[in-house]
Amino acid sequence: MSFLIVLDFNTFHSHKCLGIEHFSFAVDFDQIKIDSESLHSSLTLEGERTKQEGHDEKLRADDVCSGINKHPGAVNCRTTDDIFNLAPASSNASFLGNVDFGSYSQGFSTTDIGVDLSFAGGHNVAFDQKEGKHMISSSTGSSGCSGSTTACLDDENMSDDRPMKRKRLSSSDSLKTNYEHNESKINPFNEGNRGDTLITEKRLRKPPRRYSEESVEQKSRSNSKKSALKASKDKSLHSESHKQQWQKKVKAAPIIHKDKSFNGGCIQVPFGLPIEEGHSAKKRTCWEPEEIKDNRILCIKDKYEVESFSAESEDENTEDECTTKGNSTQKGNSRRKHHISWTLSEVMKLVEGVSEYGVGRWTEIKRLQFASSSHRTSVDLKDKWRNLLKASDTQLQNRRKVVLGRKQASQQVPESVLCRVRELAAIYPYPRENKSKESCSAPSTSSFKSTTNNMFVSLPTVM
DNA sequence: TTTAGGG
DNA sequence: CCCTAAA
């Protein structure tokens, strides 16, 4: 098994890290999967054993952000471990990043190596492709906190992303070029195997209720001064033209008929009604039709998306694609507000931004890291950071309980990122949250800060 | 306008 | 995410 992978990696390496396909293409993981299945019987015992004894070790390793080599639990990790050992030092950095995520996503499914691996493997393919892609072109490893895995991972991406984004921004004064850019860029990657499952997920998801409400409102006041105002002052104004094109497309499609067929009366009624405090109740009345309509839109949109670039739910879309989606889905105003889930790359960009500019300088971060994504306002960044802090904190606590461990932890945000968040939280204490934690919850010294500090201190020690 | 914080 | 007070 490891032999296969090693060969693969060698090709990957011999291509000067340009052929990420060689590293993560389907066959590769099929091999792994097959191997793991065939090995399952023989490995089960060992896997179970290593999984258990490895788990503690893994947790500790994660604490110091030095994960990879200590994940004996998952088959993949073992192989990557082998690779890692064989890999020339020069390629360690970029490869590390890849392995990191892989092993983390593996980590959540190690409970059942034989079964879960297939899925997690698929996931890894997707992820590694993306990440690998990012990493390949950049090799700056300027990690602030010694070469921790996290640092590699983040910086690898970030340092690459930013220049590209700037370039994109400057080279595409009209958003149209921007989109062309992105589509052509995105296309090759999204045509992976994983697209299908993700698409289905997306289609099944219910639209948030608040969204339906707002779409109603937007329709009712389509030309209200607020929208005009917002559009005019919103920086994403330049995206308007493109957006409107999308809207035309969408509108051209038989959405309205569907509405009628659904007895759209429900939709109309709420208009007349005063839409004030009775939020929940009244919204719910008009929710169903809206939902259906929304699905319609989604379907139609999906058609386009699947044609141009295979849709992909909340994964790595590169914020630009998210923008595309957002604009197309929403009618009227600047950005689709309701819950565009944060992609990992976005989170990492945020983390990177915070590490570079400090907490609280959200506009800076927005300008520099999220320049090309019209959604994600500085407020969003702030909120997300708050959430990340919370997540990292709770994760820390969960770690101590150990028992809970893997599954629930952070399926979206890899531990490495949270780890980085904690580091940054230690460096740049969040304006008031940290204080409050210190003053309120921690009469003696401070629970949170001390732990994070310890973590932060222990990092270089271990590395 | 931007940040911080509550909801 | 949204809203809003404060700076």
Image (spheres, coloured by chain):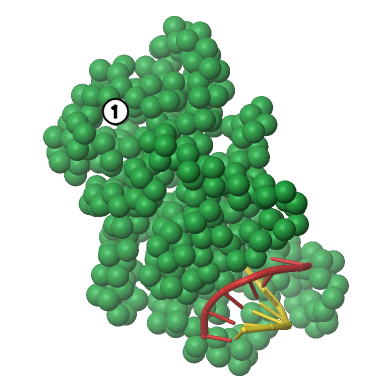
Chain colours: A green, B red, C yellow
Residue A188, visible in the rendered structure: no
Nearer to me, A183 or A79: A79
For this rendering, which residue is in front, A420 or A285? Answer: A420
In percent of the image, x 46 and y 62: which residue is there?
A354
Residue A59 location (% of width, % of height):
53, 30
Q: Amino acid at mark 1?
A: Phe
Residue A146 is left or right of residue A301, and the answer is: left
Q: Chain of mark 1?
A: A
Tag 1 residue: A84
Q: Which percent across, then down, holds residue A44?
A: 49, 11
Q: Residue at x 30, y 52 (%)?
A: A142
Tell me what residue is drawn at x 19 percent, y 38 percent.
Answer: A90
Q: Residues within 10 Å of mark 1 (few under 14, many from 20)?
A: many
Q: For the N terminus of chain A, which image quadrant?
A: top left
Instruction: Indicate the secondary structure of the residue bearing disc 1.
Output: helix
| Residue at image coords 44%, 40% | A459
State the residue in front, A376 or A293. A376
- Judge from the rendering whether residue A12 lies leftward or rightward of residue A452; answer left or right: left
In-image side of A285 versus A383 (left or right): right
Q: Which of the 4 quarters of the picture holds residue A88?
A: top left
Residue A49 at what x, y percent from top left? 52, 12
